[in-house]
């Protein structure tokens, strides 16, 4: 028992982890504290939180709550001390923010120590597109230092000097030239306004009228946002408390929201009239789309949107399957993680992450393959950095020396396109050295004996010549992975976007099975999903071979069940995958296409052939929020809503179904996408009863066995991780605890031989191998991020090139170059760096003018049809 | 980055690092080594040391600016450090410091135009029994780089300065 101002606190609070400040707040005592924040470790710098514990004055934030303490928070002595401390604070700094407000309510005037204001004239900085610094307001609480170190792991700030000259520093020069990654944690945590941001500056004077929690749409991490709004203005976005992001955000989630009201937004339906896209009424547009599709059915296809909600994806596939008698439905998972789904389904039985993001804090070794996590999934990347700084060992498999590769204990820097050879050699080392979980293999895995015979021919020493990774390093990695109590894996598109993408993922599963690292905490195989709802789009059935819940279309029982639910049948025959749709369109077999929330001309490979396919269609409809290269080819363009303008759910990469909540009204005449789809279904003679997205989710719960227990009221706080088989089920953070959903309940080891990608045969002398991917500031086609100040952080697509290759071509950082091969031509702005190996270059695809995907190849993953974005030979020369 | 340790300094670096459980822990002695090697600790040296030890450069700055014995600006050949802490204060330290400022024509932490002397007022040199005390660092003397001069008077420091001037012109 501990008492605070006469109120007793039960022992549950006195567990050694809580402080007297926590306890005081638990009983509602008001104790000012400037340098304390639950997101970071205790500082004990400001001393404002002084309280009396058994008559002694201590800092409450730095004193553990213990049994038997008698605490007073408001004695006259404490009030006088705090008042004096407040006077000292304002004598040194013109503090604003929450600290300034607190000081004002305390009646601190700044008159007691008028001569002590030593801070005036300290640095100010406005060089950064988002962050603003004015150290004249700084009270040296060091929250920014701790936030940068402990949340992002970027180490931008430090305390410099000593005594009266002590100040916060970001090193020499302008802040924009510091290593800052613009996550905004410092501005979010600063109690005085010394570090603030452009959002706060912009919204000064507006009165906040609501805070809405919703899910970020910038990647598959699914960070929870607390959107502060006033009327139709977004004042700022903070990270919400959630097991996904623990209040942390990245430069996209926190700051890249001004696209919502950008002048380029599509605000009314457009229809091509005399060759020109012309504004029309919704009625005219909807009727035209429905009649064109009906006329062309069943030779029509739907490309659904992994950026849109589960409810919308469900409707999209329901519409095409049931109204147009076709399974020609796909989504952009085809071009990113379809190989993860296929590979994992073949080996483990479920095509989704086995574990949760929280397990990153529970593992002791992380094997990270083909993922530049700190840029592509920044909040998860920061989490990995913190784990590594805390002692988790990290093995990175990547041809590039990424930020995490630099921090890694082992960086297996393989030749691009040799994933299968390398992963086989890792597995061979495990078998060769007997680093196996034999009990697990015996009881839970099938096919070990055949596999052991196969893999004995893939020893690291045999594969070294192919992969370029020394056998000794591979063996060290194998021992590190197998020697861990909890070896975990995460992987990105560097694994999947290859000729052998699906097979590569199977090999990751093999590794986990060999050491028994599936089905418990802190282990598993975890694809880091790319787009915000690419998991959900696939779960909802936006794929040609299966409908909602991965239920196969060729299964008569499935078709009977859906016919009963929908009141209409759908065909038995599998539909076309996205690349097959393009082929069919070019052959004239596919007549009409509906593209929902994707700019395929910019993001799909071999863009010239994509354009040819779309031009060959009789009819193309596009549902979008911005005009795009794809919408420019459309006959009808329907203006949809951004994630801030509608309700629904997204499912993140750890299978967590989370709410998307409307903050703003859609711009102009734009409509929420689920409503557009309902209207189109009605116009197609297939009316739907839905008046709100929750009703759509209720129908999904009836047809998707993994969603049976999902309903909006249950998603209020932290969402639910599927499968959720009943209304009482708490969700499933960890898959395969007892058995695998495969015949016999056992997982399968798969034998895969390394095959050279056919793209390598086209390599000419002097060609460099191109890898494409993302940078931190932009998301995918850049349609949203380019229309925010993120564009000033990263104004052009960067071509990373090794100094050797740059010297050979007389190129320097900043030079513009042309990339050329048999598919087409692209441009890039050179960045000379040893992050890429000699012979390889890396180019992003965020800016339409660089035409990155004009040079990516037509080679596809042999199983899932995912394009090989990560490997194509190009000739590079000065533009 | 243009700064780098000589081979000899690199050998000393390896030896220093080998005494610690991890590289980061060797920051203070490696900063001293950098100061010896480069004459002072400019931002480029902090960056270089950070890269060698796997410490973010800003954290090297944090440490290097906290401790007064790291020179953040170039110093002259002789770094004359006059103690004015309590024992020296009572026995004439401040007078000696004032005298040297006039004599060398520099303010605290200033360097003479010929680059021979840097004068600095410092805290306790731990020679209170023989106060007042002066510490002189000689950049060129690798055998005795630091020499204490105790029981000083104005007359004695005049002789000391003359002596150091002679030394400087004999072996510049």
Image: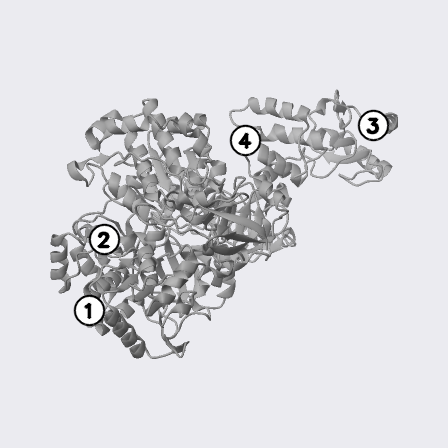
Q: Which mark is residue B24?
A: 4
Please report contact status of discs 4 and 2: CB closer than 8 Å, yes or no: no
Query: Marks 1 and 3: same chain?
Result: no
**Could you tell which of marks 3 and 4 lies nearer the N-terminus?**
4
Disc 4 crowd, CA 10 A, few/some/many (<14, 14-19, 20+): some
> In the rendering, at what x and y percent does residue A519 appear?
25, 36
Q: Chain of mark 4?
A: B
Residue B81 location in percent, x, y? Answer: 75, 31
Residue A39 appears at what percent x and percent y? Answer: 42, 46
Q: Secondary structure at mark 4?
A: helix
**How far apart are the two marked residues, 4 and 2, measured between alpha carbons?**
55 Å
Give the Cα separation between the discs numbered 3 and 2.
96 Å
Mark 4 vs mark 1: give the one in front: 1
- Which sits in the foreground, A215 or A191? A215
In the image, what residue occupies the spot 64% across and 49% down? A173
Kindly indicate the quadrant of the structure image that contains residue A658. Answer: bottom left
Q: Are marks 4 and 1 in contact (CB under 8 Å)?
A: no
In the image, residue B17 sits, relative to residue A350, either above or below, namely: above
Determine whether, in the image, residue A88 is placed left or right of residue A333: right
Q: Are marks 3 and 2 on the same chain?
A: no
Q: Nearer the viewer, mark 3 or mark 4?
A: 4
Could you tell me if residue A533 is visible in this image?
Answer: no
Q: Disc 2 marks which residue?
A: A545
């Amino acid at each position: 028992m501990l008492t605070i101002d006469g109120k007793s606190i039960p022992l549950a609070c006195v567990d050694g982890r809580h402080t007297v400040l926590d306890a005081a707040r638990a009983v509602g005592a008001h104790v000012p504290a400037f340098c304390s924040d639950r997101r970071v470790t205790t500082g004990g710098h400001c001393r404002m939180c002084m309280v009396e514990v058994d008559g002694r004055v201590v800092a409450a934030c730095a004193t553990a709550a213990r049994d038997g303490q008698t605490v007073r928070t408001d004695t006259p002595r404490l009030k006088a001390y705090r008042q004096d401390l407040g006077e000292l604070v304002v004598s040194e700094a013109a503090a604003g923010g929450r600290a300034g407000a607190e000081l004002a309510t305390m009646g601190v005037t700044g008159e007691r120590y008028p001569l002590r204001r030593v801070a005036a004239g300290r640095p100010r900085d406005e060089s950064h597109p988002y962050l603003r610094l004015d150290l004249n307001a700084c009270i040296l609480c060091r929250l920014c230092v701790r936030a940068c170190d402990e949340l992002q792991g970027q180490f931008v700030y430090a305390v410099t000097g000593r005594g009266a000259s002590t100040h916060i520093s970001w090193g020499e020069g302008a802040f924009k030239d510091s290593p800052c990654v613009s996550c905004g944690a410092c501005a979010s945590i600063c109690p005085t306004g010394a570090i603030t941001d452009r959002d706060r500056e912009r919204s000064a004077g507006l009165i906040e009228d609501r805070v809405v929690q919703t899910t970020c749409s910038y990647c598959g991490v699914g960070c929870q946002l607390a959107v502060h709004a006033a009327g139709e203005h977004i004042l700022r976005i903070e990270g919400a408390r959630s097991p996904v992001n623990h209040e942390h955000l990245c430069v996209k989630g926190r700051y890249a929201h001004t696209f919502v009201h950008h002048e380029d937004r599509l605000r009314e339906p457009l229809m091509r009239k005399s060759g020109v896209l012309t504004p029309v009424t919704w009625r005219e547009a909807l009727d035209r789309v429905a009649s064109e599709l009906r006329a062309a059915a069943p030779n029509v296809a739907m490309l659904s949107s992994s950026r849109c909600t589960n409810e919308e994806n469900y409707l999209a596939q329901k519409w095409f399957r049931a109204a147009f008698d076709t399974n020609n439905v796909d989504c952009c998972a085809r071009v990113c993680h379809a190989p993860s789904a296929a590979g994992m389904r073949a080996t483990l039985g479920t095509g989704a992450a086995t574990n949760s993001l929280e397990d990153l804090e529970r593992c002791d070794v992380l094997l990270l393959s083909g993922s530049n996590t700190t840029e592509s999934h920044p909040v998860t990347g920061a989490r990995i950095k913190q784990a590594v700084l805390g002692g988790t060992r990290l093995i990175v498999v990547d041809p590039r020396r990424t930020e995490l590769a630099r921090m890694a204990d082992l960086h297996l820097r393989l030749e691009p396109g040799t994933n299968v050879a390398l992963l086989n050699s890792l597995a061979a080392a495990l078998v060769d050295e007997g680093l196996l979980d034999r009990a697990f293999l015996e009881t839970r895995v099938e096919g070990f004996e055949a596999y052991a015979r196969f893999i004995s021919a893939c020893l690291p020493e045999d594969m070294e010549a192919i992969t370029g990774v020394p056998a000794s390093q591979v063996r060290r990695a194998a021992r590190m992975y197998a020697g861990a109590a909890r070896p975990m894996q995460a992987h990105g598109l560097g694994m999947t976007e290859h000729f052998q993408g699906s097979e590569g993922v199977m090999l990751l599963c093999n590794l986990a099975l060999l050491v028994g690292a599936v089905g418990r905490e802190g282990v598993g195989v975890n694809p880091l999903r790319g787009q915000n709802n690419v998991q959900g789009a696939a779960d909802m059935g936006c794929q040609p071979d299966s409908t909602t819940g991965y239920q196969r279309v060729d299964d008569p029982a499935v078709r009977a069940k859906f016919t009963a639910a929908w009141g209409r049948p759908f065909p038995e025959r599998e539909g076309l995958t996205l690349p097959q749709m393009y082929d069919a369109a070019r052959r004239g077999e596919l007549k009409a296409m509906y593209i929902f929330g994707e700019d395929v001309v910019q993001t799909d490979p071999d863009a010239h052939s994509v354009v040819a396919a779309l031009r060959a269609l009789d009819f193309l409809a596009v549902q979008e929020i911005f005009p795009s290269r794809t919408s420019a080819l459309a006959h009808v363009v329907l203006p949809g809503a951004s994630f801030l303008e509608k309700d629904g759910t997204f499912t993140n990469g750890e299978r967590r179904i989370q709410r998307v909540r409307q903050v703003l009204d859609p711009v102009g005449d734009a409509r929420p996408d689920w409503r557009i789809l309902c209207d189109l279904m009605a116009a197609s003679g297939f009316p739907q009863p839905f008046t709100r997205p929750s009703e759509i989710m209720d129908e999904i719960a009836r047809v998707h066995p993994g969603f049976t227990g999902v309903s909006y009221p249950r998603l209020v706080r932290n969402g639910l991780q599927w499968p959720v088989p009943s209304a009482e089920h708490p969700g499933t953070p960890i898959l395969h605890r007892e058995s695998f959903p495969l015949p016999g309940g056992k997982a399968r080891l798969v034998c895969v031989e390394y095959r050279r990608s056919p793209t390598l045969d086209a390599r000419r002398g002097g060609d460099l191998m191109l890898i494409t991917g993302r940078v931190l500031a932009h998301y995918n086609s850049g349609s949203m991020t380019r229309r925010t100040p993120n564009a000033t952080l990263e104004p052009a697509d960067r071509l990373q090139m090794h100094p050797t290759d740059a010297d050979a071509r007389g190129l320097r950082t900043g030079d513009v170059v042309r990339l050329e091969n048999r598919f087409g031509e692209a441009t890039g702005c050179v960045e000379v760096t040893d992050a890429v190996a000699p012979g390889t270059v890396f180019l992003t695809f965020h800016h339409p003018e660089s035409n990155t995907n004009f040079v990516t190849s037509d080679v596809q993953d042999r199983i899932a049809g995912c394009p090989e974005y990560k490997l194509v030979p190009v000739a590079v020369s000065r533009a | 980055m243009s700064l780098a340790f000589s081979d000899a300094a690199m050998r000393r670096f390896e030896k220093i690092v080998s005494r610690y459980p991890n590289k980061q822990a060797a920051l203070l002695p490696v900063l001293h080594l950098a100061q010896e090697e480069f004459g002072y600790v400019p931002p480029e040296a902090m960056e270089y040391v950070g890269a060698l030890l796997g410490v973010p450069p800003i954290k090297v700055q944090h440490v290097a600016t906290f401790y007064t014995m790291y020179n953040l600006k170039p110093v002259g050949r002789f770094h004359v450090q006059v103690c004015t802490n309590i024992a020296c204060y009572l026995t004439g330290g401040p007078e000696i410091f004032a005298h040297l400022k006039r004599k060398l024509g520099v303010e605290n932490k200033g360097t003479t135009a010929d680059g021979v002397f840097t004068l600095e007022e410092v805290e306790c040199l731990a020679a209170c029994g023989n106060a007042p005390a002066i510490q002189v660092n000689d950049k060129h003397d690798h055998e005795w780089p630091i020499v204490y001069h105790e029981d000083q008077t104005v007359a004695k420091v005049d002789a000391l300065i003359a002596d150091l001037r002679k030394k400087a012109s004999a072996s510049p």
